[in-house]
Amino acid sequence: MSRTHSHHHGVANHGVANHGFGDDAEDHAVLAEMLDLDAQVITGYLGDVTTSVFDRAADRPIGRILDLGAGTGNGALALAARFGAAEVIAVDQSAEMLARLEAKAVESGLADRVRTVAADLDTAWPAVGAVDLVWTSMALHHLADPDAALRQIFAAIRAGGLLAVAEMTAPVSFLPDVIGIGRPGLAARCQDAFSGHAAAAMPHLGSDWGPRLAQAGFTSVERQDYRIELDGPLPAAAGRYAQLSLRHAMTHLDSLSADDLATLKVLTDDEGPDSVLRRQDLVIRGARTLWTAERP
């Protein structure tokens, strides 16, 4: 099953991968802000993808949901709202992320059905008991052994339950083809440089998870592809989202020329007319894929 969505103004998602962020409080704060900005800027994707999971779960009793790699909780809270009687257990290794999630659950009136568990899935599997649905977004590719994690997930899901895996299949880009400063083609060069970095640093990024789900024992694997395309006018948060994302990307784009890095510094500055905070020509491009499967 495959589906392509072209989203324009007012559409957004919740998952930003933790590519190369450190462990200090400042890094966690930046990543948390990026996760929340992603949800504000690309809203329609999250609604679409959780609707797909809800539809796939039709006629199944979904009483307990496990969100692995929950971040600031955009997915967990969307699923709690969608499955109105379900308990949602949100797992992440960052205490800061989970604190934000808990605060958002209170604000959303969902605190009575959402609880958090701190755990590093590469070291110890959380003792959460049996669940009916596992959701994991932009998280599996970070694990040292995602196939071992899938076997753990399979064991945690009750017979007839579901797994939903959402992953990035093309990184988010923000720059139009012509930006008016620097050498033409910067956006394409940034994408190429990031893809090269990702291939070396994150070997599981871009995996076709369907065969891996089948190998773990899941059946009835379905795939849906989502293309994200937002043209202006974009939400107000888009400039800040672009600034943080490009600033972080610059730390991994060693293959870019000094001229390109200088242009990116201008684009990500807090001041100046060419800063992404002030530009009116930003675009949002990316691709994400959802795999759903059943535990027989």
Image: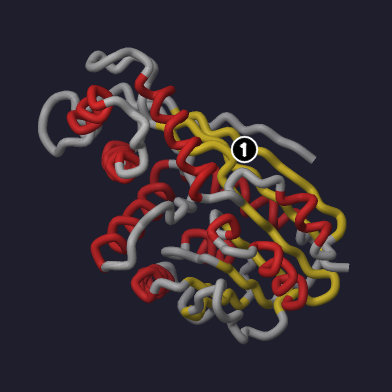
Location of residue 95 in the rendering, given as x and y in whole percent from the top left corner: 38, 76
* Quarter of the figure with residue 177: top left
- The kind of residue on which mark 1 rests is Tyr
Quadrant where the C terminus sits is bottom right
The residue positioned 74% from the left and 70% from the top of the image is: 151
* Quarter of the figure with residue 274: top left
Q: Nearer the viewer, residue 184 or 14?
A: 184
| Label 1 secondary element | strand
* Quarter of the figure with residue 146: bottom right
Q: From where the camera sits, is residue 236 visible?
A: no
Furthest residue toward left: 271
Dot 1: within a 10 Å radius of its alpha carbon, few (fewer than 14), some, or many (20 or more) residues? many
Location of residue 19 in the rendering, given as x and y in whole percent from the top left corner: 43, 52
Quadrant where the N terminus sits is top right
Location of residue 36 in the rendering, given as x and y in whole percent from the top left corner: 38, 54
Q: Nearer the viewer, residue 161 or 183?
A: 183
The residue positioned 66% from the left and 46% from the top of the image is: 207
The count of marks equals 1
Q: Does 247 sit left or right of 223 as displayed?
A: left
Q: Does 259 sit left or right of 96 as displayed?
A: left
The residue positioned 27% from the left and 42% from the top of the image is: 247
Q: Nearer the viewer, residue 138 or 104?
A: 138
The residue positioned 24% from the left and 17% from the top of the image is: 182
On screen, residue 269 above or below 148: above
Q: From where the camera sits, is residue 191 visible?
A: yes
On screen, residue 71 above or below 178: below
Identify the colour scheme used: secondary structure
Determine which residue is flagged by label 1: 226
Location of residue 198 in the rendering, given as x and y in whole percent from the top left corner: 49, 43
